Amino acid sequence: MTGSEVPRSFRLAYVPGVTPTKWVRIWNERLPDIPLALVTVSAAEAPDLLRDGGADAGFVRLPIDRTDLSAIPLYTETTVVVVPKDHVVAAVDEVSAGDLADEIVLHPVDDTLDWELRPGRPANARPDTTADAIELVAAGVGLLVVPQSLARLHHRKDLTYRPVLDAPESRVALSWPEDETTELVEDFIGIVRGRTVNSSRGRPTPPQPKRERPDTGGARRKPAAGKSTGKSIGKSTGKSTGKSPRSGSGGPKGGRRGKPGRRS
């Protein structure tokens, strides 16, 4: 590399709630000469960031506009409702959307859940972000339904959360521009999918030469047609000639030496 060349790097975007620490650590172990830069982005802005070249790949929340983007779904999150610790919902293990019918349920602008019919009663105004909605829940204004990772991200000691059984779930995917599936993108796909270091890029490896098995003297080889091996000969002759039967050398069983008996 000449002095004017800039070292290659890999830019990885991720949306709130996703923790890329494990994958970044594996990247640094496998490709220590290629720095990985993290780019934080909102769920709504992530697809356009990838299309505009702001990152090589990114963790996004589905559904997204898949135009010009490839995506590999990775996992699905549980959906929870965030409530004050002294709320009646905190006394149960789980709820349904119908259980929230009489509650004010906040709907932030950056919400990523794909509802057909939102639960509860709407608030007078929509908070701009999930973080703003969390503050309103703490103030007793309403409740908030979010993916569990966002409830953990915005954890407060005065709040808790419970699973909502029949709510839509949030799916997290790895996405990148489909026309920019570079070798580094393939490397990161391999890391996320748990491939070993030798197969992380997902490209076929050249065939390996077969090792010759050591010659064991033909003991385990199948004898050719019409030929007997030394071992098989030894077995047959050992049984027939190694020990003579009591009746003599190959005579019929019960035969005796000497004069024949007198006939009556």
Image (cartoon, rainbow, N blue to C red):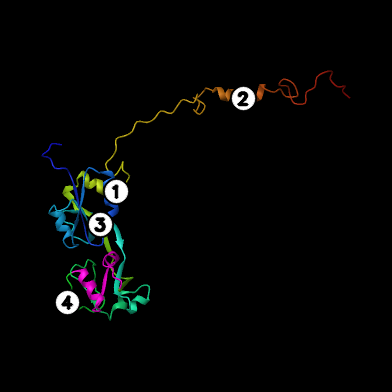
Mark 3 or 4, which is nearer the eye?
4
Q: In which quarter of the image is residue 103?
A: bottom left
**Where is mark 2, residue-wise?**
236
Residue 236, visible in the rendered structure: yes
How many angstroms separate mark 4 from mark 1 (CA)?
A: 43 Å
Which of pointers 3 and 1 lies earlier in the amino acid sequence? 1
Secondary structure at badge 3 equals strand
Label disc, if present, on residue 125 of the rendered structure? 4
Q: Where residue 130 sits: x, y (%)?
A: 21, 69
How many angstroms separate mark 4 from mark 2 (CA)?
A: 97 Å
How many angstroms separate mark 3 from mark 4 (CA)?
A: 30 Å
Label disc, if present, on residue 26 of the rendered structure? 1
How many angstroms separate mark 1 from mark 2 (CA)?
A: 62 Å
Secondary structure at badge 1 equals helix
Q: Where residue 22 sits: x, y (%)?
A: 30, 53
Mark 3 or 2, which is nearer the eye?
3
**Where is mark 3, residue-wise?**
173
Apparent side of residue 18 relative to residue 234 in the rendered image (left or right): left
Tell me which amino acid carries mark 2.
Ser
> Within the magenta stretch, is there residue 169?
no
How many angstroms separate mark 3 from mark 1 (CA)?
A: 18 Å
Mark 1 or 2, which is nearer the eye?
1
Q: Give the range drawn in magenta.
A: 129-157
Mark 3 or 1, which is nearer the eye?
1
The residue at the far bottom in this view is 102
How many angstroms separate mark 3 from mark 2 (CA)?
A: 69 Å
Secondary structure at badge 4 equals loop
Tell me which amino acid carries mark 4.
Ala
User: Mark 3–mark 2 contact, CB under 8 Å?
Assistant: no
